[in-house]
Image: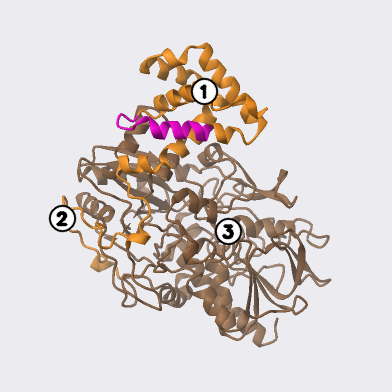
């Protein structure tokens, strides 16, 4: 049963397009979407039930020439299937994989693990300079507990 | 570590988090031998990882559970009602660190608010005055900033936006604490290095947890037998109805029996009532200590909600102590706002992995990517307020779902009360105004995450018909059975509960020591 979905170039292409339409970041390259597509396939392989959902979903995309739709038409198409288990499974595992991707973190301006670099104590935890320095102590009248 | 015979009747503590860990230290310090049964593994600070999903997989309580009710968590995360920890140190290894005390009126909500339709309000059987000395002890143990001479943490970027926004809407009660992470070295713990990882375990050991303080100190007394990967599954009792042992499973599923002279249950507000329900017997047909029928009822999880605001300029909210920013201006009870009780605003930051999953679960398309594209220019806050105790919000044993040991899993049912909805709507609006006052260009109103504050399912009551426990957290029905976690809370108040759990546990331990030393138990 697991052979029904094989991470073939065509399956990859359909899933990458689907993920791009779901998460349309203009400045992301294909790499993170491709890795997310692979993660969707791997997650589905955990149970035969999921494989069948993915297999049928991909066939539907093919039948409806999803790969040829422009961005607006593709979005409309996905809107029409967003209540299906197929959509939910691609959205669920695709989202986790896409935003757990270190290349994506970099694009979004997130620096990832910090402990080994000594945290942010000397690396900008308080470098915001477009607002005045606020008070950090408690309001004086409130020591009434 | 001390090895205690399974036939020796000792105090058996179930759980090693804020309540259980505190009990273990306070009791062993007073010369009382204890066995601590911890369901999770003994993770150490060096085991933690600075990665949201990997840490979640390592630390979170992921055992089988189910949900029901109208709360959105049940739709988005039907098998994950909570986000709490299964490891030595419990959820203190994951908590952020905000430690306000409960207010005087929050111990008397029925008297203060009056009867609220659909809510099962009740005054606590203790007052703030009675608890105040123990709050002092708890703040000293936790090293709360802004208290007892401990200096405040500095402002991080997220706090700068938050506090300036507070000023922008004429709030006064903002500060970087009280917060239980060291600004400078204290009590054998170093100062914070502002690494931004709180929910993933603190590798630096600057944050208070029972893993860093109470558990090692309890072990050092030579009187504590800590047994990780030991999940309590039943409390048994003798013919007189007194608890006499705890049955538990080791990692391989082998069943063990530890004799008990007293039992302190501190498994957090889902597992604690589940354990009492699993302990039903012919003498206690509805579950141990459940003559009131209140075991598992009145489940509270705090109001909660988050607001992520976007700006033209960078913020980098993830740098620094996650929750070292508290605003108390909306905390006081002011029914003119259209609801009873109040709420705090507290800084909050998630990494992109978790923000993507929790900002608006299920969302996709251009509106969603706008939230993510603005990540480095986003400031965040959490809203935490009092939710109403409702009799029908409850933890029960599932009739269909079972855990991997074939024991009934917990089902967590929760419906938002209309007071909760009114408070959340108010808080979203106030938070939006706050961020707009410092130039925010857009915001995401984020629904509650799986619950981190789980309260009230074994509540204390003056009258044995209204609740499960007396004013020391001892079961009305079983004189040597105590509950030592957030389940004991009669109502939930608005503040983060850990400080109060610790204060109550210190008070309970003092009482239990007296009972044991005087021979009453």
Location of mark 1 (residue):
A11
Q: Nearer the viewer, mark 3 or mark 2?
A: 3
Front-lying residue, A116 or A9: A9
Magenta stretch mostly in which secondary structure?
helix
Circle 2 — which element? Answer: loop
Q: Position of residue B229 (x, y in %)?
A: 65, 63
Front-lying residue, B275 or A103: A103
- Chain letter tied to brown: B
Location of mark 2 (residue):
A132
Residue in the picture at 56% in, 79% down = B218
Chain A as rendered: colour: orange
Front-lying residue, A42 or B52: A42
Horizontal side, residue B375 vs residue B127: left or right: left
Q: Position of residue B385 (x, y in %)?
A: 42, 52
Which image quadrant: the N terminus of chain B?
bottom right
Residue in the picture at 59% in, 72% down = B472
* Pointer 3 chain: B
What is the number of callouts on the image?
3
Location of mark 3 (residue):
B86
Q: Position of residue B95 (x, y in %)?
A: 45, 60
Magenta span covers which residues? A25-40
Q: Nearer the viewer, mark 3 or mark 1?
A: 1
Give above or below for B219 relative to B296: below
């Amino acid at each position: 049963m697991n052979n029904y979905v094989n991470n073939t170039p065509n399956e990859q292409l359909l899933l990458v397009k689907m993920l791009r339409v779901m998460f349309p970041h203009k400045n992301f390259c294909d790499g993170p979407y491709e890795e997310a597509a692979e993660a969707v396939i791997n997650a589905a392989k955990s149970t035969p039930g999921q494989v069948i959902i993915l297999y049928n979903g991909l066939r539907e995309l093919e039948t409806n020439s999803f790969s040829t739709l422009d961005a607006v038409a593709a979005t409309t198409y996905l809107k029409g299937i967003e209540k299906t288990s197929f959509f939910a499974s691609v959205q669920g595992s695709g989202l986790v994989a896409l935003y757990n991707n270190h290349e994506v973190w970099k694009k979004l301006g997130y620096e990832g693990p910090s402990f080994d670099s000594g945290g942010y104590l000397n690396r900008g935890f308080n470098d915001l300079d477009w607002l005045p320095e606020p008070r950090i102590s408690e309001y004086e009248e409130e020591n009434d507990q | 570590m001390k090895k205690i015979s399974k036939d020796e009747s000792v105090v058996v503590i179930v759980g090693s988090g804020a309540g259980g860990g505190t009990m273990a230290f306070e009791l062993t310090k007073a010369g009382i031998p204890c066995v601590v049964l911890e369901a999770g593994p003994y993770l150490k600070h060096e085991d933690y990882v600075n990665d949201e999903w990997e840490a979640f997989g390592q630390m979170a309580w992921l055992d089988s559970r189910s949900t029901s009710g109208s709360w959105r968590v049940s739709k988005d995360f039907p098998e994950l009602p909570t986000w709490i920890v299964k490891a030595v140190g419990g959820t203190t290894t994951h908590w952020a660190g905000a430690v306000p005390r409960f207010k005087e009126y929050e111990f008397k909500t029925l008297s203060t608010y009056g009867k609220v339709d659909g809510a099962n309000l009740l005054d606590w059987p203790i007052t703030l005055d009675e608890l105040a000395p123990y709050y002092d002890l708890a703040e000293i143990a936790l090293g709360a900033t802004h208290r007892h001479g401990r200096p405040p943490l500095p402002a991080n970027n997220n706090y700068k936006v938050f506090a300036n926004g507070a000023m922008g809407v004429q709030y006064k009660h903002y500060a970087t604490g009280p917060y239980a992470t060291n600004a400078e070295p204290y009590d054998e713990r170093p100062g914070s290095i502002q690494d931004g990882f709180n929910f993933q375990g603190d590798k630096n050991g600057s944050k208070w947890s029972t893993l860093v303080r109470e558990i090692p100190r309890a072990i050092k007394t030579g009187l504590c037998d800590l047994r990780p990967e030991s999940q309590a599954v039943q409390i048994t009792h003798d013919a007189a109805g007194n608890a006499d042992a705890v049955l538990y499973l080791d990692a391989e599923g082998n069943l063990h029996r530890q004799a008990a002279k007293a039992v302190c249950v501190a498994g957090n507000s889902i597992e604690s009532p589940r354990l009492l329900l699993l302990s039903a017997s012919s003498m206690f047909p509805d579950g141990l200590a459940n003559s009131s029928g209140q075991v598992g009822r009145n489940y509270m999880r705090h109001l909660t909600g988050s607001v992520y605001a976007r700006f033209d300029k960078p913020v980098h909210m993830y740098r620094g102590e996650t929750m070292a920013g508290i605003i108390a201006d909306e905390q006081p009870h002011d029914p003119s706002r259209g609801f009873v009780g109040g709420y705090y605003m507290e800084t909050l930051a998630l990494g992109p992995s978790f923000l993507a999953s929790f900002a608006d679960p299920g969302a996709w398309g251009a509106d969603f990517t706008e939230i993510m594209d603005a990540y480095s220019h986003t400031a965040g806050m959490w809203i935490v307020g009092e939710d109403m105790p409702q009799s029908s919000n409850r933890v029960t044993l599932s009739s269909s779902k079972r855990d991997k040991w074939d024991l009934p899993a917990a089902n967590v049912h929760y419906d938002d009360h209309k007071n909760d909805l009114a408070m959340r709507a108010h808080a979203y609006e106030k938070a939006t105004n706050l961020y707009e006052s410092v130039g925010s260009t857009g915001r995401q109103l984020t629904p509650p995450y799986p619950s981190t504050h789980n309260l009230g399912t074994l509540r204390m009551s003056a009258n044995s018909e209204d609740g499960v426990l007396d004013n020391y957290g001892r079961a009305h029905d079983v004189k040597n059975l105590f509950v030592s976690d957030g389940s004991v809370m009669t109502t939930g108040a608005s503040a983060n509960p850990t400080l109060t759990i610790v204060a109550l546990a210190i008070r309970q331990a003092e009482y239990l020591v007296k009972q044991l030393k005087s021979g009453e138990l």
